[in-house]
Amino acid sequence: MRSGEVLTLKWQQIKFDSHMKTVTMELSGADTKTGEPRMIIMSGDLYNAISSWYKDTQLQHPRCEWVAHFKGRKLKSIRVA
């Protein structure tokens, strides 16, 4: 994923499968640089890290819709963060 795609990723675009221990991220064509829809499936340590981040976000910032955030505020740049 490109950094711009990560920064605009919302929790609603992510599906967790606790049985298979996978996380699926679905990007529409409007969300990608090439205009092509994309699906990313991750497992293992990445599943653990993202599911943990989701749980922490829900507890501390329940109204935050962004995956890439700092204290509930959307990150605008990785360099600034």
Image (cartoon, rainbow, N blue to C red):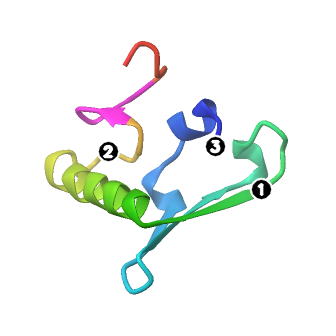
Local crowd size for mark 1, using a 10 Å CA cut-off: few (<14), some (14–19), many (≥20): few
x 53%, y 59%: residue:
13
Numbered disc 1: secondary structure: loop
- The answer to whether mark 3 and mark 1 are in CB contact below 8 A is no
Mark 2 and mark 3: span between their CA atoms? 21 Å
Residue 70 in magenta stretch? yes
The residue at 83%/51% (across/down) is: 36
How many neighbours does mark 3 have within 10 angstroms: few (below 14), some (14-19), or many (20 or more)? few
Asked whether 34 falls inside the magenta stretch, the response is no
The range drawn in magenta is: 69-75
Task: Check the image and report above or below for 24 versus 2.
Answer: below
Circle 3 or circle 1, nearest the eye: 3
- Residue type marked 2: Cys
Residue 6 relative to residue 51: left or right: right
Alpha-carbon span between mark 3 and mark 1 = 12 Å
Q: Which residue is mark 1?
A: 37
Give percent across and percent down for residue 2: 65, 36
All told, the count of numbered labels is 3
Image quarter of the C terminus: top left
Mark 2 vs 3, N-terminal side? 3
- What is the three-letter code of the residue carrying label 1? Pro
Q: Which residue is mark 2?
A: 64
Residue 77 rendering spot, x and y as whole percentages:
49, 20
Residue to which mark 3 is pinned: 1
Q: Helix, strand or loop at disc 2?
A: loop
At horizontal 48% and vertical 59% (from top left) the residue drawn is 12
N-terminal-most mark, 2 or 1: 1
Element assignment for label 3? loop
Q: Residue furthest bottom?
A: 19
| Side (left or right) of 34 relative to 79 | right
Residue 80 x, y percent position in the rendering: 41, 13
